[in-house]
Image (tube, helix red, strand yellow):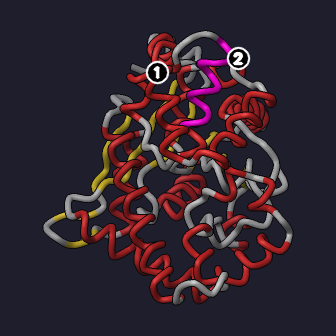
Amino acid sequence: MADNNKIKILAVTGPTASGKTALAIELAKRLDGEIISCDSMQIYRGMDIGTAKPRKEELRAVPHHLIDILPADAPYSCSDYVKDAERAIDDIVSRGKLPIFCGGTGLYLDRLLKGGNADEAACDPEIRKELMAFHKQNGTDALYDRLVFLDPVAAKTIHKNNIKRVMRAIEICLATGQKKSDVDKKNSEIVDKYDHRVITLCFNNRELLYERIDRRVDAMIAEGLVEETKRLIAAGVFERSQTAAQAIGYKELFPYIRGESTLESCTDELKRASRRYAKRQITWFGGKDYAHKIYVDEGGQLKTFENIVNISQKLF
């Protein structure tokens, strides 16, 4: 139910390559809105092709916020995002416009809507530095075992290869003395902060989504993803930033750039990694009761873009 005392916001979410950017831009045009990125990697300058950042013409079509706000090796937390997003909302609303979030980083959106602050409490650079050193020396399995020991409930919800989230969960435990799973439970009980409508793009036929992912990866390679990755390596970004080093779209190309594998093999691995990421996004948003599902396909065929726009607009 709408709450007229709360600021209204719209969000377009869903798995990678589902068509979020185009839909958000069209809705912004029709609803007099401005877009706030909800992507944990598009905040970084110089990481353009690999993060599927909106093209220049798309950025010019409607105002965008929280894109290219930091150098690629700068630390940034969920708490930082919430603060920046809230400032962007206030700015947009002050001009009589509608804030429209667009992106697939579900944790960022969830924390914004629910108002939790575990990341702020757990911000301890020394602990993070120790965990990075521990991971480098002992490996992924040993790091994950520490999380299993400290918070087995949280460990069940985080894949061991998601190094950033594993470290964050351990950091919360060590910095606050609380389990991340307990903090998340408390946050889930917080009353929604905004009068929001969240659209999640879905596919009845998962293979149609995977085809879109494969075409996007091929386009990224053609547009210069290898060269972009080489520039970031030369600048030392991946050495200084664990977040950048783990970003899908770059690490899969490292073996090719080192001369250890073929470009075709690395491209195939990038497609597989992107499909696995899409599955995790589908699972995340599928479990949120605030997400209004809109199916992009019907009867084995993609719906027209206009049809998807009209359905989305009616929800708001």
Q: Residue at coordinates 53% horizontally, 21% vertically from top-left?
A: 114
The alpha-carbon separation of the residues under discs 1 and 2 comes to 17 Å
When asked about the image quadrant of residue 305, the answer is bottom left
Is residue 32 visible in the rendered image? The answer is: no
100 and 276: which is toward the camera: 276
Is 169 on the left-hand or right-hand side of 307?
Answer: right
The quarter of the picture where the N terminus appears is top left
79 and 171: which is toward the camera: 171
Q: Give the range drawn in magenta.
A: 166-176
Q: Disc count in the image?
A: 2
- Measured as percent of width and height from the top left, residue 275 is found at 38, 64
Q: Is residue 172 magenta?
A: yes
When asked about the image quadrant of residue 285, the answer is top left
- Measured as percent of width and height from the top left, residue 58 is found at 66, 68
Mark 1 or mark 2, which has the lower sequence index?
2
The quarter of the picture where the C terminus appears is top left
Callout 2: few (<14), some (14-19), or many (20+) C-alpha neighbours within 10 Å? few
> Quick check: 135 above or below 228?
above
Q: Name the residue under label 2.
A: 121
Q: Which amino acid does label 1 sit on?
A: Asp
Which SS class for mark 1? loop
- CB of mark 1 within 8 Å of CB of mark 2? no
Q: Nearer the viewer, mark 1 or mark 2?
A: 1
140 and 316: which is toward the camera: 140
Is 262 on the left-hand or right-hand side of 236?
Answer: left
Q: Residue at coordinates 60% horizontally, 43% vertically from top-left?
A: 164
